[in-house]
Image: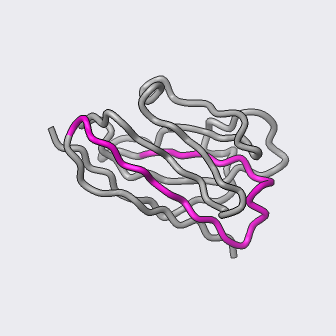
């Protein structure tokens, strides 16, 4: 079955950086839009960033715009989230997700994604 495996999470001080990776298998990766979501303790999961199938278009939540960068390498079946200038409020479990070919445009909502990873913890200390 389809697998999405996140890595790269960890503990970092405020102002620091992390790069998350999500490796996909058993799907035609280049046919899927890819997104990152996060869920902080006691809060609902929220959209973070989206990248189109080709990687040519990206979209960000206002809370991370200018600090986070989403990218993908279709040859490696991997999507990335570069996170700079991290803040304590960025602390959350981060999930990658795959939005199927039938979806057009930016996928910002959970119901637009068919496959999810297991998540990776990011903790930002103050």
Position of the N terminus, as image quadrant, is bottom right
Front residue of this view, candidates 94 and 7: 7
- Number of marks in the image? 0
Residue placed farthest to the bottom in the image?
A: 1
Front residue of this view, candidates 29 and 74: 74
Residue shown at the point (46%, 35%) measured from the top left: 68
The percent position of residue 115, horizontal first and vertical second, equals 65, 59
Colouring of the image: one colour
Front residue of this view, candidates 24 and 110: 24
Residue shown at the point (29%, 57%) measured from the top left: 10
The percent position of residue 2, horizontal first and vertical second, equals 68, 70
Residue shown at the point (33%, 43%) measured from the top left: 17
Tell whether position 29 is magenta.
yes
The percent position of residue 63, horizontal first and vertical second, equals 42, 26
Tell whether 99 sits left or right of 8: right
Position of the C terminus, as image quadrant, is top left
**What are the residue bounds of the magenta stretch?**
14-38
The percent position of residue 107, horizontal first and vertical second, equals 68, 38
Tell whether position 96 is magenta.
no
Residue shown at the point (26%, 49%) measured from the top left: 123
Tell whether 2 sits left or right of 39: right
108 to 117, vertically: above or below: above
Residue placed farthest to the right in the image?
A: 102
112 to 29, vertically: above or below: above
């Amino acid at each position: 079955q389809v697998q999405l495996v996140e890595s790269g999470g960890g503990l970092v001080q405020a102002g620091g950086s992390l790069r998350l990776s999500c490796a996909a298998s058993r799907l035609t990766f280049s046919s899927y839009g890819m997104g990152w979501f996060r869920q902080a303790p006691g809060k609902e999961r929220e959209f973070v960033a989206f990248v189109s199938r080709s990687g040519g278009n990206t979209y960000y939540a206002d809370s991370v715009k200018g600090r986070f960068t989403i990218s993908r390498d279709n040859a490696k079946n991997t999507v990335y989230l570069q996170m700079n200038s991290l803040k304590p409020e960025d602390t959350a479990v981060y999930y990658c997700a795959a939005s199927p070919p039938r979806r057009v445009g930016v996928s910002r909502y959970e119901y637009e994604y068919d496959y999810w990873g297991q998540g990776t913890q990011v903790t930002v200390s103050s």
